[in-house]
Amino acid sequence: MDQPMKKIALLIYDGVTMLDVSGPAETLSRADGYELTLLSPAGGSVTTAAGITLSETQPAAGVNPRDFNTVIIAGADELPMSPIPPALLDATRHLADGPQRVASVCTGAFILAELGFLNGRRATTHWKNAQDLARRFPLVRVQPDTLHVHDGKYITSAGITAGIDLSLSLIEEDQGAEVARSIARDMVMFMHRPGGQSQFAAATHSPSVSNPILQKVLDTIRKQPGKQHTIAGLAEDAAVSPRHLGRLFREELGTTPTSWLEQFRLSIAQQLILDGNTVTAAARKSGFPSDDSMRRAFERRLRSTPSEYRARFSSTFRSSV
């Protein structure tokens, strides 16, 4: 017997980030069993931040939220900096009353937090906005270093392309990991990334920074990934104090030197593991002090052992290159 279609609503509005809409829409449309509906506070046309107009949205107030399995709230660059329009809050409040899952992409988490839906819950957003989210909403347990977080019926994701990872996680939940991996391969993604993976990983190898001191430090690390770099040593080479170096990392990359360095090593180790390297070889080439320290990083950040990671993602990786 055929399963009924799962109805997914995407709530959008003027100024919305285009990829926050198109990423989930494209991903979910490639899976069987989903019916997508574009909603907006007032209905009609919506102009994205890219200047592209999306027409024929339905007014949120005109739908029954219980008709939808999932509602996805898209983000916008202005949300952390400006008051959220009352009509957008009203639309979200209405739509959240009924579906099994309510998700946000990027700064869409600010809308859910403003309504109190994330109080006492774990949540994430774009790493650049994580501190603002935590400061404005102290009852939210902000996790800045994850791609997406599931807590009860609420699911929040990191910036922009993480909306694709979020959508793949919904597909995996509904239809299984193999279906999600197949869609990831079809979309020529490097891999179907687990939600616990750091959102910094995608930018780890070539982050954009403006401070020349920090850029020199990052270049040093990238040129010698297998070296046993220490924060004290990197600071000494850059002629700054470890404290000053830490401030540069927080200001430009939104994380600490220790966390960034571990994620850099982990991202290299992931690639090496998928390339067929042993755990010992991957740890040595990626700069981890020992096999055990690499295993701990895998378990803490990816909720997986290196062997489990290889088993889960190696087929996706090989099919994407």
Image: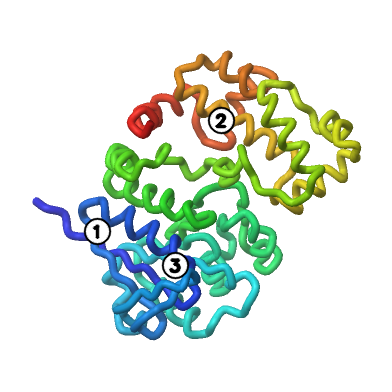
Tag shown at residue 34: 1
Q: Tag 2's secondary structure? A: helix
Q: x%, y% of residue 306? A: 50, 24
Contact flag, marks 1 and 2 (Cβ < 8 Å) = no
Label 3 residue SS: strand
> Mark 2 is on which residue type?
Phe
Tell me if I can see residue 12 in this picture.
yes
Residue 298 tag number:
2
> In the rendering, at what x and y percent does residue 256 appear?
74, 43
Q: Quadrant of residue 238?
A: top right
- Identify the mark at residue 319; answer none if there is no mark: none
Tell which of 45 and 255 is nearer to you.
Answer: 45
Q: Separation of disc 3 and disc 2 at Cα? A: 30 Å
Q: CA distance from mark 1 to mark 3?
A: 17 Å
Location of the C terminus by quadrant is: top left
Tell me the crowding category of disc 2: few under 14, some 14 to 19, or many 20 or more residues within 10 angstroms, Cα based.
many
Residue 158 position, x and y percent, is 53, 54
Q: Residue at x 41, y 52 (%)?
A: 164
The amino acid pointed to by label 3 is Ile
Q: Earlier in the sequence, mark 3 or mark 2?
A: 3
Above or below, 94 relative to 302 = below
**Outermost residue, left side:** 1
Sequence-wise, which precedes: disc 1 or disc 2?
1
Q: Residue at x 56, y 58 (%)?
A: 121
Displayed quadrant of residue 140: bottom right
Instruction: Give the crowd class for mark 1: few <14, some 14-19, many >=20 residues within 10 Å.
Output: some
Residue under label 3, please give it.
73
What is the three-letter code of the residue carrying label 1? Answer: Tyr
Quick check: 270 left or right of 314?
A: right
